[in-house]
Image (cartoon, rainbow, N blue to C red):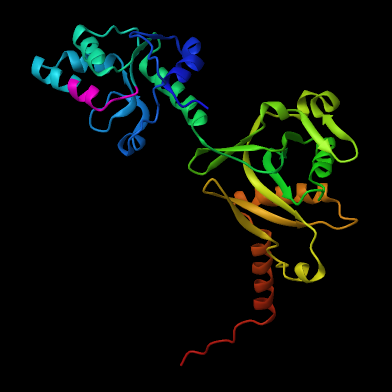
């Protein structure tokens, strides 16, 4: 996990043309900071001394602003910049800091870096990288598969048939992301992205067959590296009483909380003779319609209500 400035620079320096202006710190420098105040700060942004960022970027607009200040105001701004103890100050556009900035950085032991990219490119690239690298993560037992362009997580008790169902879906042209231990990260307030641990990528365990390499068997198009999670399907062996409790109109649609995000969840009964692959495809198509604003259950109820109103029209009203 990228949790220090040094690891961030090691990962992004070649692409973003980053170089150290000061000596690289010997001890790991936390990106998030150690105090509660630091935890509330934005990770990266243009120079801001009111709501400071953990990574303060100084580009040409900020450089013009700083050079336009009087000597007293300039010194106060620099003191304020380093008093907030940023993880680092980064200069874009190959800007070289002046002696005052270098002295303040050395006094406060704040790392300085530079890049030849312009400030907005640098901020956008680092923000995207940090969003994924520092996202909240959770591993859930199940099979994560792409069905009709939607990320679907198959969960259920061991030996319920998750891998067999996934194999049938793959044979029908759908793609697998991860078997057994998909890893999910919250990359936006309402967005969960699922990936596969490197050691498990391409593999699917099917009881009786052992470990299968899906990429080798079905080709490159049968595997995808990551996908947004849209739907959870919980495979359950339900008895007659439990089946009777399922709403005949709306089905078993509920929600499952993953990293604080409510993800639609469907309980799918498992029984001999049921074609689960077709049912999963139908569930995904049904969910796509819900996302677009159409619900067949609501439409059915409205249609019945209209039919009843036609059969039993309102009594006529008479004017006096």
Could you tell me which residue is drawn at 46 percent across and 20 percent down? 8
Left or right, 271 with reference to 74: right
**Who is closer to the viewer here, 170 or 241?**
241
Left or right, 14 with reference to 170: left
**Who is closer to the viewer here, 119 or 311?**
119
Question: Residue lying farthest front?
Answer: 27
Please say if 18 is above or below 273. Answer: above
Q: Position of residue 86 (x, y in %)?
A: 31, 24
User: Does residue 292 appear anywhere in the picture?
Assistant: no
Please say if 47 is above or below 171. Answer: above
Q: Which residues are magenta?
A: 79-87
User: Does residue 225 appear anywhere in the picture?
Assistant: yes
Q: Position of residue 78 (x, y in %)?
A: 19, 19
**Who is closer to the viewer here, 216 or 212?**
212
Could you tell me which residue is drawn at 67 percent across and 41 percent down? 150
Residue 151: name its quadrant: top right
**Who is closer to the viewer here, 288 or 177?**
177
Please say if 159 is above or below 205. Answer: below
């Amino acid at each position: 996990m990228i949790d220090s400035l040094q690891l961030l620079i090691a990962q992004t320096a070649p692409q973003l043309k980053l170089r150290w202006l000061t000596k690289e710190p010997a001890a790991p420098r936390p990106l998030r900071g150690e105090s509660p105040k630091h935890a509330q700060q934005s990770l990266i942004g243009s120079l801001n001394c009111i709501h400071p960022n953990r990574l303060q970027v100084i580009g040409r607009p900020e450089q013009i602003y700083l050079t336009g200040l009087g000597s007293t105001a300039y010194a106060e701004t620099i003191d304020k910049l380093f008093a907030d103890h940023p993880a680092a100050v980064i200069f874009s556009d190959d800007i070289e800091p002046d002696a005052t900035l270098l002295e303040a950085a050395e006094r406060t032991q704040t790392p300085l870096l530079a890049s030849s990219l312009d400030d907005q490119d640098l901020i956008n690239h680092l923000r995207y990288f940090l969003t994924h690298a520092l996202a909240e993560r959770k591993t859930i037992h199940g099979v994560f598969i792409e069905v009709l362009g939607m990320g679907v997580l198959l969960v259920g008790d061991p030996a319920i048939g998750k891998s067999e169902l996934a194999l049938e879906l793959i044979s029908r042209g759908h793609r697998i992301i991860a078997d057994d231990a998909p890893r999910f990260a919250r990359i936006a307030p309402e967005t969960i992205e699922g990936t596969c641990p490197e050691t498990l990528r391409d593999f699917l365990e099917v009881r009786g067959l052992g470990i299968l390499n899906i990429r080798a068997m079905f080709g490159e198009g049968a595997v995808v590296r990551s996908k947004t999670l849209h739907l959870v399907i919980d495979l359950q062996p339900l008895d007659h009483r439990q089946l009777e409790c399922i709403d005949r109109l709306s089905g078993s649609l509920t929600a499952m909380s993953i990293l604080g995000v409510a993800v639609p969840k469907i309980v799918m009964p498992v029984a001999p003779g049921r074609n689960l692959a077709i049912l999963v495809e139908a569930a995904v198509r049904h969910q796509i319609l819900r996302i677009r604003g159409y619900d067949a259950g609501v439409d059915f109820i409205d249609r019945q209500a209209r039919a009843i109103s036609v059969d039993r029209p309102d009594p006529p009203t008479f004017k006096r």
